[in-house]
Image (tube, rainbow, N blue to C red):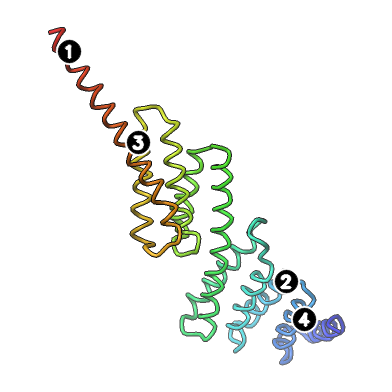
Amino acid sequence: DYQKAIGYFESVFNYGRGNEWAPEAQFQLALAKRKQGKHLVAANEFKRFTQFYRNHPKRVRAEFEEAQSYYNRSPKYNLDQSDTKKAIELFQLFIDRHPDHKLVSESKEKVDELRAKLAHKKYDAARLYERRDMWRAATTSYRSLFDQYPDTPWADDALLGALRSYLRFADRSVENKQAERYQKALDQYSQLTQLFPESSLLSRAQPLKEEAERKLKQVRERQQSQSLARDGTADTMN
């Protein structure tokens, strides 16, 4: 009965938080709150432990458990990710403060997992822009995703999305902007092949790259023809 245990732990504080049983009661209180599924309350209790008992042997473990409490609250990727970001912040703080601790490896794994969740959410936002033909927003979102989360499983998806979106953005641009945007599409392809040579997405990227090359060549040929025509008109007038 966790509630009965919580009552017992809280009764210890009647003798003051400086008594010899108080640190263990505080730590166990936080764990009991977690067992009840009250992860935010548990996080606050672990934080209270670190504030009251700075020199206690369990202080470092309490720092980890505070981060773990926010990790437990982290929802599915498509929901608000405030707790996910807080967990990343606290795990990273733990890693920085205690680089040789045995829990650093687990903390790093959880940071990677949570960052992938944030990347997934950002990818879905970029895809939504793309489906709505909001090409400028799509290109910006895909690039932002890659720049922020290049070490996640969504990085190559982001580059493919940026390639696809720059290509369609160029298709719908005024002529004097098309060459620049087709080239941007090709830049995404180059980065994708250089950074992810084994990616399963390369087969989908290849025809987009060839399309961008063909259209870029056509734009440049038109621009060259127009330039020659202008030069010829200028010579005639002279």
Q: Quadrant of the N terminus?
A: bottom right
Asked if the residue at tag 4 contacts the one at tag 3, i.e. Cβ–Cβ closer than 8 Å, the answer is no
Q: Residues within 10 Å of mark 3 (few under 14, many from 20)?
A: some
Residue nearest the observer in this picture, 80 or 20 = 80
Q: Quadrant of residue 5?
A: bottom right
Q: CA distance from mark 2 to mark 3?
A: 55 Å
Q: Which residue is mark 4?
A: 32
Q: Earlier in the sequence, mark 2 or mark 3?
A: 2
Residues under labels 2 and 4: Cα distance? 10 Å
Report helix, strand or loop for mark 3.
helix
Q: Please identify the quarter of the rendering in which residue 224 is found.
A: top left
Left or right of 163? Residue 92 is: right
Residue 215 badge: 3
Q: Residues within 10 Å of mark 4 (few under 14, many from 20)?
A: many
Question: In the rendering, at what x and y percent does residue 49 appear?
Answer: 67, 79
Q: CA distance from mark 4 to mark 1?
A: 86 Å
Give the amino acid at mark 2: His
Disc 2 designates what residue? 39
Position of 162 with respect to 23 (left or right) is left
Q: Amino acid at mark 4?
A: Ala
Label 1 or label 3, whichever comes before in sequence order: 3
Q: Is mark 2 in CB contact (under 8 Å) with mark 4?
A: no
Which badge, 2 or 4, comes first in the chain's sequence?
Answer: 4
Q: Is residue 145 shown above or below 21? A: above
Residue name at image x 34 percent, y 48 percent: 187
| x, y percent for residue 101 | 50, 85
Q: How far apart in space, not on screen, are marks 2 and 1 (Cα)?
A: 76 Å
**Secondary structure under the numbered disc 2 in the rendered image:** helix
- Up-down: is 52 above or below 127? below
For the residue marked with disc 1, what is the amino acid?
A: Ala
Q: Nearer the viewer, mark 2 or mark 3?
A: 3
